[in-house]
Amino acid sequence: MIRPTETVPLEVPEAESYADIEAGLRAQVPEGYTLADIRVSQPRGTSYMVGTGTAQKAEIREITVERRDQLQASIPEGWQALSIRPA
């Protein structure tokens, strides 16, 4: 199984809670993507939180190769292997 490596950075510059950050990031996720990462920080001396995230393409494909050493050559540019199953 392979998936695209393409990602989209997301940001919530100011929020009162983790739930607000998560909701704000999820609202920014483009169609065809999933929210893959959330990072939260609270700037020193403030009462608010800042959130950043990463959206990743949701598409997954299955590829088949006869030998494991052929795997890398069969992965298109901009894609990465997720898992390998024996034939």
Image (cartoon, grey):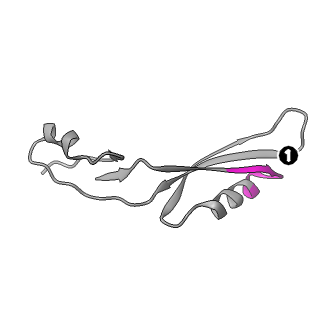
Label 1: state its secondary structure.
loop
Give the farthest residue toward the bottom: 31
- Does the segment drawn in magenta span residue 4? no
Q: Residue at x 85, y 46 (%)?
A: 48
Q: Is residue 56 left or right of residue 66?
A: right
Residue 67 coordinates in the image, percent (x, y): 10, 42
Residue 39 coordinates in the image, percent (x, y): 65, 43
Q: Is residue 71 left or right of residue 56?
A: left
Give the farthest residue toward the front: 77
Residue 28 coordinates in the image, percent (x, y): 64, 61
Provide the residue span drawn in magenta. 11-20
Q: Amino acid at mark 1?
A: Tyr
Q: Is residue 66 left or right of residue 21?
A: left
Q: Residue at x 85, y 32 (%)?
A: 44
- Does the segment drawn in magenta span residue 13? yes
Q: Residue at x 62, y 48 (%)?
A: 53
Q: Residue at x 21, y 55 (%)?
A: 63
Instruction: Using the image, determine if residue 69 lies above or below residue 50.
Output: above
Task: Return the residue at label 1.
Answer: 48
Number of dots carrying numbers:
1
